[in-house]
Amino acid sequence: MAKMKVIVNPAADRGQARQKAGTILALLAEKGLDFDVEHTNWPGEAIELARAAVEAGYETVVALGGDGTSQEVINGLMQAPHTGPAGTLGVLPVGSGNDFAYGVGIPLNVETAVEHLAAGQARVIDVGFVHVDGVPDRYFGNGVGIGFDAQVAIESTRVKRLRGFTMYF
């Protein structure tokens, strides 16, 4: 398998990804995967990092984070110049919801997800596109929310004691 770029969002799952990243990267190395790592420092940076990774020749870009990280990496893959498929997205789900990973059949157990990534298991997915005047164009992989669900996501950031599904419920 060709060298891949792993984009780590240390803020995923309310910062829990920061503690998990080292162990997960060690698992990737144990599987013999050849990869470089970039950590995000602000929202939206994974878009830039993924686009730059494709432009630098990486065929696979791995989102180590949650749904937000996956969506940003999808946007970077889609925005990068390409004439065929946009590239391969890998996902190591360490977010609070992981709806995207679940929806496309990626195991939510990170160790199993690493095994699938190492085995090169891939599938084609559909990607949607949203254009709203005055808002940056966005690609999405599993869903787009512009009403109640978007407000729930905003409000969930105020809930400090809960994590995962219960935070959104």
Image (cartoon, helix red, strand yellow):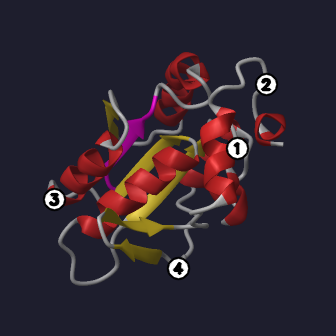
Is 161 within the magenta?
no
- Front residue of 16 and 156: 156
- At label 2, the amino acid type is Leu
Q: Residue at x 33, y 33 (%)?
A: 37
Tell me the quarter of the picture where residue 1 sits.
bottom left
Q: Which residue is drawn at 70% across and 19% down?
A: 160
Disc 2 vs disc 1: Cβ atoms closer than 8 Å? no
- Give the magenta-colored segment's residue range: 1-9
Instruction: Reply above or below: 165 against 75.
Output: above
Quadrant assignment for the C terminus: top right
Q: Residue tagged by mark 1?
A: 97
Disc assigned to residue 55: 3
Q: Residue tagged by mark 4?
A: 126
Total number of numbered discs in the rendering: 4
- At label 4, the amino acid type is Asp
Disc assigned to residue 162: 2
Q: N-terminal of the two: label 3 or label 4?
A: 3
Q: N-terminal of the two: label 3 or label 2?
A: 3
Q: Where is residue 114 in the image (x, y as percent from the top left)?
A: 60, 43
SS at mark 1 in the image: loop
CA gap, disc 3 and disc 4:
22 Å
Q: Which residue is drawn at 64% across and 44% down?
A: 153
